[in-house]
Amino acid sequence: METKAMIQLLKNTDGRRTRFNRHYSTALRYYHNENDITLRNDGESKTKEEGKEAEDGPLRHADNRVSSNYAQLLIDQEAGYLATVPPAIDVEDDNLNDKIKNTLGDNFNLRLNQLVVDASNAGVGWLHYWIDDDKQFRYGIVPPDQVTPIYSSDLDRKLLAVRRSYKELDPDTGKQFNVHEYWTAKDVTVFKSKLSDYSDLETIDDRFPTYDVSTGDEVGAGAVFDHGFGRVPFIAFPKNKDQRPELLKVKGFIDVFDNVYNGFVNDINDVQQVILVLTNYGGTDLSEFMKTLKQDKAIKMDNLGPSDKSGVDKLTIDIPVEARDNVLNRTDSKIFVDGQGINPTDFKAIGNASGTAIRALYGHLELKASNTEAYFRDALSELVRAIMGWLGVSDADSRPISQTWTRTAIQNSLEQAQVVAQVAQYSSDEAVAKANPIVDDWQEELKNRQDDIVAQDGYGNPDADDQLGGEDDDQT
């Protein structure tokens, strides 16, 4: 892309990028337990028994600002429930399945977990893939605030290009500058700038090596790289249809909880402050007054007669404990209901509950996780097809892809094992392996069963060939 056209594109996408990043930065603050209640403390939770100004009143001194970590709890609940065990991929070819699994790597579940967290905070997570110098397929998670997608305007909503903007440090000057990458289905062009109006935008001409087409030798460097994928190598993992952050569901209730809770703590601190109001005190020295009160347990007052109002009154704070407890409990419940999570205190009551009771406890979370899985399935299939394309699979874009997602939840394993045992003789080996509560990888379990059958045949098991679908020796 030419520099002039890139400047116009950056300006046209800045408004959308700014709005997106504003929502994302707020959600990220809450995920890091830096709620609005802590803004005065630069995001840090602090307790202050003496923090308010005098105009707040003679009894109002405490200014505690402690944020509640609901946002991280709700998001991590879903990420752990949905992505602790990576989904099993099946493309109807065991050899190809192994290659795909090896390419995804051992830390695929961690990256999927991060995608769930990013999608929850931003409304959409982003994955970028590339071929490294060793000609190996690689992929990584891109921070959502760096990516601004450009889609087609038709109903297919095809990803046409991606603007990726981020800061980079100049090792020569020690100063930061902005990098802007423009990715298309064919190539990527890299620019840099420092000014907000992009008037100084220019290409980074030493970003990628360039090669002689005839000899394959490296002959220099340039700002454009032909990635050769035939598609934009970025994959969106949306959280929901509207790609809205999860925080928007519960932010108001979290703020209410923080305000009521901290107001409660402030009153507890301030209730210790008792102010005595003296009328016609028979003295002028307050230190003498305190000494007399402590020693004699009495106060000298000047009384002018029956109608005189001389005496001692005290100012204290009344704390509506019951009302505040009611608000906190109701708000806590609303956060978990609207946020579709599980209140950890609910686990105290389940004991040795049946599978049905446990599933009911996970009902809201399962609804949210199932919706996330539905959107992640398409994105994951796109990643698998990119891997198959790199592996040279001829039907990479049309081959059926099966995904088996496993939930990580508290369960009654004994009850589940009993169910599996009762239906095992009427079910396929694959169904039994998938439902087995002690099996994490059902595909590996099937392979292990096949190996066991082969091993048993060496010890005179006459049915081994039949179990493997083979033929009797006298038929060969």
Image: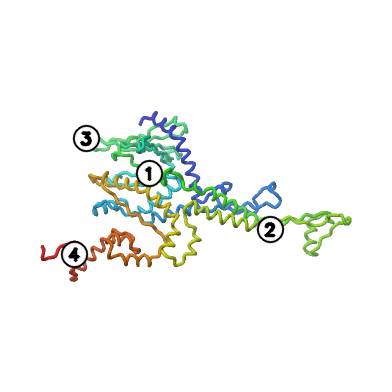
Residue ID for mark 2:
272
Q: Residue furthest right?
A: 305
Nearer to us: label 1 or label 4:
4
| Disc on the earlier residue, 1 or 4 | 1
Q: What amino acid is found at the position of numbered circle 1 in the picture? A: Ala
Query: What element does badge 3 sit on?
Result: loop
Q: Are marks 1 and 4 in contact (CB under 8 Å)?
A: no
Q: What amino acid is found at the position of numbered circle 2 in the picture? A: Gln
Per the model, the C-alpha gap separating discs 2 and 4 is 83 Å
Please name the residue shown 38% across and 33% down the image: 203
Per the model, the C-alpha gap separating discs 4 and 3 is 58 Å
Tell me, for residue 466, which label it has, or none. Answer: 4
Within-10-Å neighbours for mark 1: few <14, some 14–19, many 20+: many
- Residue 471: x and y, percent? 15, 63
Residue ID for mark 3:
214
Per the model, the C-alpha gap separating discs 1 and 4 is 47 Å
Tell me, for residue 208, which label it has, or none. Answer: none
Tell me, for residue 236, which label it has, or none. Answer: 1
- Residue 101: x and y, percent? 29, 53
Per the model, the C-alpha gap separating discs 1 and 3 is 37 Å
Q: What amino acid is found at the position of numbered circle 4 in the picture? A: Asp
Per the model, the C-alpha gap separating discs 2 and 3 is 86 Å
* Residue 233 in which image quadrant: top left
Q: Are marks 2 and 4 in contact (CB under 8 Å)?
A: no
